[in-house]
Amino acid sequence: MSKGKWIAGVTVAAVVLGGGGYAYYASQHNDNATGGKVGNLNVEYKNDKTVKKGGNLNVAYESDVPFKAQFVSELSDDATMAQMGAPSGGSLFNIDNEFNIQKGGPANITFDKNAKTATVTLRDDLKWSDGKPVTAKDYEFEYELVANPAYGSSRWTDSLANIEGLSDYHEGKAKSISGITFPDGEDGKTIKLQFKENKPGFKHSGNGYFLEAASPYHYLKDVEPKKLASDPKTTTKPVVFGAFKPEKVVSGESIYYTPNKYYYGKKPNLKSITYTTVDPSKTVASIKSGKYDIVKEGSPNVYPQIKKLNNVAVTGQQQLYIEMLNFNLGHYDTKKSENVQDRKTPLQDKRVRQAIGYARNVDEVDKKFGNGLESRANTLIPPIFKDYSDTKLKGYPEDIKKANKLLDEAGWKWDKKHEFREKDGKRLNLTYMARQKDSNSEAIAKNYIQQWKKIGANVTLYKGRLTDFNTYLQITTSPESGAWDLTDAAWSLSSDPSQNDLFSKGAQYNTGHFTSPELTKKLNKIDSSSIKNDKERAEAFKDYQKYMNDEAYVIPTTFSTDYTPVNKRVANWSMAYGDNNAWSDLGVTSNTPAKN
């Protein structure tokens, strides 16, 4: 599973990074899957009717912004695309319900701890949709896409530097990657990775220390690197190895899939899949009329209406998700590939950051707008990681008295009118880049601005309005991230909860650009080769969470439950995380969808 992803679009669309390969476990099915419930929602939808051969499945992703078609995961920052690209395949490795890598997928991986190596073995019958075999070079090429700056990928992380020679290749000191070799040649099916250290997260998908996808070198090798991300070969005319291949791509709107005749696995039940985006204002009506069989990433504000419909079953799952308040503290040095915390802002004082956190009334907001699907986050590790999430931390509940005390201690005094705070003749002015997510976004942003006014902070919206996701992404991921001070950020996290690839000194997705020797030490400890067992790793996670809670580089905001309405003609739908044979198992039991 990918290391993490930004939240985009309407609710929880995202940017993908780290481990590589699209994250789409929530729509797959296999024998490792388990049912059960999350809250009042079933994880799976049981349909006992006979599955028809053929039929078209209509799937929608709720979003108010166009998606950017990109089938090479290392070149995409858009979780909308991660979801919409899912039928074409993505991850090379199967997982179980606890995100442990399992045998039997497109590839297997084995580790030699003494030699500090991993051997990736591709299936003999794994082929691209043009009939060409998936080769060792295709897997190695994925590392080139990430590590060679010419391709423009934003996935380079400190974690990948654990592979011998990859840093030298990234920095232009070497023309090849010494730590990646081909025991049976580039056209073979075996790849050996040489690590500098063994890591405790190796067994988990999404650990970020090795990639989990492949790209067709034979098809892409002649495209100029700087043009690859916009070339039709990666956007509208890709080759893939999943159960379905993109037949027609209308970038920003839809993808039409047909079965991939070279797929190694079970022949799909469906004749085709039409995957499109749906505007949130039309979601309920579209589901009610049967226009869509499945709608992904529905916003919480329409959930009460959807759960009353009798033509759909609503399934649910705990999200690998954390929403947070992000502070802009520096910039990203592209020459050194590291974050520098040097921005002149009152937010460099952690007491100011803490005060901003305590001033928010997140519990009240979640109760009013979350419809039972959201709760205030107390830490940066979601509760789905029950062994690692520190449930004892309180996080930042509303406490205006405490916020005011912190600003007093930081030297920010009320002006004569007791309207705003000042220090050294300057008012406490902050610019808030609030994202346009759904119909409640403006009300929530105005609410927080009023809350901050209670403690004397003069907070204004970036350019006087809410910021759409595409603009937000462009601003926050640029090395010089602009004249904003605080923003809504969110990650749909990896199936390994290490946040090294999110908040390390070299992480490009550390968009607040904060760093410290202590933070580096604590992040490294979580992934240290000295960790002997899960108990020790859990202790390191909890130590990290306490540190981040105190430093308030980011303020945890919300945990969420994902829900998906499924038309009652759909069969074999599951949101269990241990599912791997996704789209070939999905089917329909009727030629026409159920209508409300």
Image (cartoon, rainbow, N blue to C red):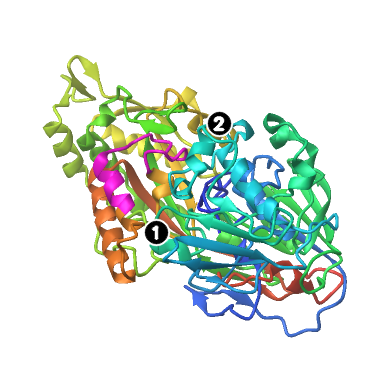
Left or right of 306 in this view: 530: left
Whole-percent x and y of residue 304? 56, 62
Above/below status of 580 relative to 548: below
Residue 521 is inside the magenta segment? yes
Can I make out residue 219 in this image?
yes
Residue type at mark 2: give it: Gln
Left or right of 238 in this view: 558: left
Q: In front: 313, or 576?
A: 576
Local SS, label 2: helix
Q: Are marks 2 and 1 in contact (CB under 8 Å)?
A: no
Q: Which mark is residue 384?
A: none
Q: In front: 104, or 4?
A: 104
Q: CA distance from mark 2 to mark 1?
A: 29 Å
- Mark 2, Cα crowd under 10 Å, few <14 / some 14-19 / many 20+, is few
Q: Which mark is residue 474?
A: 2
Q: Quadrant of the C terminus?
A: bottom right
- Mark 1, Cα crowd under 10 Å, few <14 / some 14-19 / many 20+, is some
Whole-percent x and y of residue 573? 67, 72
Task: Give the magenta-colored segment's residue range.
Answer: 504-524
Residue 73 is inside the magenta segment? no
Q: In front: 245, or 84?
A: 245
Above/below status of 464 relative to 140: above
Q: Which mark is residue 375?
A: 1
Whole-percent x and y of residue 99? 50, 68
Q: Residue at x 79, y 59 (%)?
A: 133
Left or right of 407 in this view: 27: right
Q: Residue at x 57, y 63 (%)?
A: 119
Q: Residue at x 55, y 35 (%)?
A: 174
Residue type at mark 1: give it: Ser
- Examine the image and state in which quarter residue 78 appears: top right
